[in-house]
Amino acid sequence: MRQYRPGWLLWLLLIAFSVQMRMAGAPVDEFKKQSAVGVKAAESLTQVTGVAISPLLGMGAVGAYKYYRASAEERKSLPWFAQPWFFATALLLVAVCMAKDAAGPVVPTSLKKPLDLVELFENKASALLATGVIIPIALEIFEQTKPHLSDSLDLAGLHFAAAGLAWMGDLIVVPVALLTFAVVWLVSHTINVLILISPFTTVDAALKSFRAAILGTVAGAGIVDSRLGAAWSLILVLICVLLAPWAFRTVTFGTLFAWDLVTFRRKRFVPDAGGIWMFSARPLGSAPTRAYGRLIRDDQGRLSFVWRPWLVFPARTEVVPPGRYVVGKGLVHSEILRVEEGKAPDVFNLPPRCNSHEEGIARIYGFSEIRPVGLRAAWTWLKGLFSPGSPVTATGG
């Protein structure tokens, strides 16, 4: 007996399926229109991922792309982000940021860091503005096939009159698109935070180049083939989901530090005897690095760290291991150190609002010493070369 190859069997199944579609009154043209949903979904996933990686550049590029693809009549009805006044301004700002990054090695750190601080808040504002771009992109998935889907896939037979798949699709796709955007942007935004806290311009350039390379692969894969772009975007989304907890803590850390510096919060801050908010500098029990919480003295006199996962979940309390703790006074922010065997690793990072309040913090927790750390320690050491009698440490009350 003749053996049929799998390829022939596949062709027979496709022919039978096509015949069944025609007998059921579903033309091939309509089936093609409905299958276009998958292609549009692939393009939308690529666009959402690209906008999330770099909101300002993504909005400008997507807007320019839609504008130049549209006819003269269609351009009048394009959304706001696809109008020349917006995408031209967005791309101009991106060019200015690129020029700043290109000149990074020759720009003094004292001038570059304030610009990095401005870019940090610009990225946040662009992300909020980009949500107005993500929703139209998500709604476009069903736009081309909505009339056909609503007619042929109506659920009236299930007593859901006038409820079509397109309407339910929009209800699902928009939240998924916004969630995808939020996760990818959160991880991408950590690059802005790392650039802000990094003292090396070479590291800043490497981080910016890495983000630009990832954005380039997303755009390039989407140009080559929409399915390839969607597959690569999906891989990036899954990676971002895994990195989201770490990214959230890092973004919270950088945002709070930047806000304290910009608003000169230390001038209005008063140390609270009931506990001071700070970040863990290393894992502490179930609290990971950069967990945000309050350091308190419990009823038994022990140091305890009270924190909430994702800032909103039920509070958890971690008892700080006993030992000798001191306050480290830094130039930008201070720390709480644990002195052990001649070493003093940082256990908690105090936000910039605590600067110049180290003595009060030492009194609250009963720490007996305040010592310089970081750049302040280097400056103290340098002064000690010329005045050997100058103190290196100061004692708190």
Image: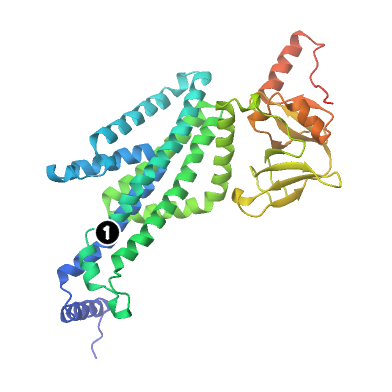
Look at the image and tell me whether residue 232 can be seen. Answer: yes
Q: Is residue 141 above or below residue 345?
A: below
Extreme-bottom residue of the structure: 1
* Callout 1 crowding tier (Cα within 10 Å): few <14, some 14–19, many ≥20: some
Residue 56 point in image, percent of width and height: 37, 37
Instruction: Tell which of 309 and 31 is nearer to you.
Output: 309
Q: Is residue 237 above or below residue 265?
A: below
- Left or right: residue 61 versus residue 387 is left
The residue located at (33%, 60%) in the rendering is 170
Extreme-top residue of the structure: 386
Quadrant in which residue 296 is drawn? top right
Q: Is residue 346 above or below residue 14?
A: above
Instruction: Tell which of 380 and 296 is nearer to you.
Output: 296
Question: Disc 1 designates what residue?
Answer: 39
Q: Dot 1 lies on which element?
A: helix
- Quick one: quadrant of the C terminus? top right
Look at the image and tell me whether residue 280 can be seen. Answer: no
The residue located at (64%, 29%) in the rendering is 352
- Left or right: residue 6 versus residue 324 is left
Residue 128 point in image, percent of width and height: 42, 42
Residue 103 point in image, percent of width and height: 42, 22
Q: How many marks?
A: 1
- Quick one: quadrant of the N terminus? bottom left
Instruction: Tell which of 221 and 314 is nearer to you.
Output: 314
Quadrant in which residue 161 is drawn? bottom left
